[in-house]
Amino acid sequence: MKTMKKMSSIMVGLLMVAGTVGFSQNTRIAEANAKDYSVEKTNMKKDAKLNTYVIERDMPGAGALTVEQLKEVSQISNAVVKEQGPEIKWLHSYVTTDKIFCVYKAVDKKILNEHAEKAGFPVTSISKLAVVISPETATTSVH
């Protein structure tokens, strides 16, 4: 628990630094890997009891976080997920100028809120994913 409190204070510090960085900074932090999410069948049995959620986090200056800061935030998230066990799994996140959108598999919203609290992350909203579509959806035949 002491480790989680330390991690939370680190996260608060990172958010304060991010909030003071100007948005005119033209540094690319990370590149998103283009993936086809038109059909998500991997680990269906293993993750059968887990639902997919999108967490919206308002974080002014998030897009200006350095690679090192993003690495540290990721380590915090991983540590909390490990502590919480198999009922939660972080898949990936999208960092925009002022928000981070995180995709998780979890048994329910409660465990996601607990994760955010332990890690010191803000939560604006949590939405259960209904379906994933892509450009390929337009050409997929329905059986």
Image: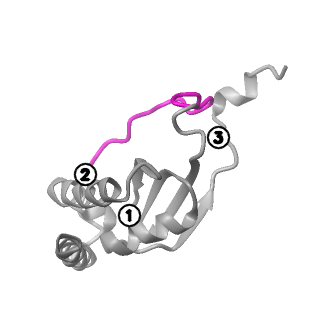
Residue projecting furthest to the right: 143
**Who is closer to the viewer here, 41 or 56?**
41
The residues bearing labels 2 and 1 have C-alpha atoms spaced at a distance of 11 Å
Q: Secondary structure at mark 3?
A: loop
The location of residue 65, given as percent across then percent down, is 24, 62
Q: Is residue 31 left or right of residue 110?
A: left
Contact (Cβ within 8 Å) of mark 2 with mark 1: no
| Prevailing SS of the magenta stretch | loop
The location of residue 106, given as percent across then percent down, is 52, 53
Mark sitting earlier along the chain (2/1): 2
Could you tell me the amino acid type at mark 1?
Answer: Thr
Q: Nearer the viewer, mark 2 or mark 3?
A: 3
**Who is closer to the viewer here, 111 or 27?**
111
The tag on residue 132 is: 3
Q: Is residue 50 above or below residue 72?
A: above
Q: Is the N terminus in the top left, top right, bottom left or bottom right quadrant?
A: bottom left
- Residue density around tag 2, few if under 14, some if 14–19, many if 20 or more, within 10 Å: some
Could you tell me the amino acid type at mark 3?
Answer: Val
Q: Is residue 70 left or right of residue 68?
A: right
Where are the magenta residues, as a range?
Answer: 28-44
Could you tell me the amino acid type at mark 2?
Answer: Ile
- Residue density around tag 3, few if under 14, some if 14–19, many if 20 or more, within 10 Å: few
Residue at label 2? 29
Q: Is residue 116 left or right of residue 14?
A: right
Q: Image point 40% across, 47% down: which residue?
A: 92
**Who is closer to the viewer here, 47 or 94?**
47
Mark sitting earlier along the chain (1/3): 1
Residue at label 1? 97
Q: Nearer the viewer, mark 1 or mark 3?
A: 3
